[in-house]
Amino acid sequence: MQQFDCFFSSTIPIQRRDQKLGDGPKIAPKGPLSMTVFASVQKHLTAITTAQTDFAKSSFEASKAYFESLASVKSPDKFIELTTEYAKSAQATFVSEATKIGELYQAFAQEAFKPITSSFLPK
């Protein structure tokens, strides 16, 4: 293994082609601050993305149904009734979905920062 000076005045190792992959120095050392397992992070991010996509689809469908029902309204009373129903259901759906997505983000953050928090918390 040869050492070369980098323009930041630090020495970087250069691996030759004839060296085996595991012969060189370890780039990411194992220890209390090692990286999180990516499978777990990917699982959480997939769940968050799925929840947000499902919420966007259901919100779009509810808005579409609301505007379709507005097309057939003939009286102001019916308009106010439909608008009130839609606003109440949209607000309730938003609060429940935002709570659900917030819990997913909380679980993701706890999992992603577990190596950092476990190394700094007293044992």
Image (cartoon, rainbow, N blue to C red):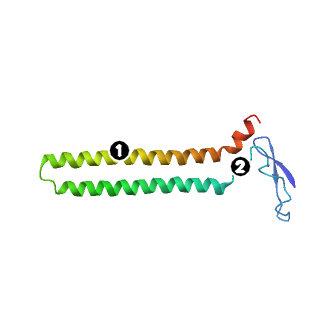
Dot 2: within a 10 Å radius of its alpha carbon, few (fewer than 14), some, or many (20 or more) residues?
Answer: some
Identify which amino acid the numbered label 1 is placed on: Gln
Q: Quadrant of residue 9?
A: top right
Q: Which residue is painted at 22% across and 56% down in the image? A: 69
Q: Residue at x 72, y 35 (%)?
A: 121
Residue 5: which disc?
none
**Amino acid type shown at disc 2:** Met
Mark before the other along the chain sequence, 2 or 1: 2
Q: Residue at x 74, y 47 (%)?
A: 34
Number of on-image labels: 2
Q: Is residue 123 above or below residue 74?
A: above
Secondary structure under the numbered disc 1 in the rendered image? helix
- Which corner quadrant holds the N terminus? bottom right
Q: Nearer the viewer, residue 29 or 59?
A: 59
- Residue on which disc 1 sits: 91
- Mark 2 to mark 1: distance in Å? 39 Å
Residue at image location 20% in from the left, 54% down from the top: 70
Relative vertical location of residue 29 with respect to residue 50 in this rendering, above or below:
above
Of marks 2 and 1, the one in the foreground: 1
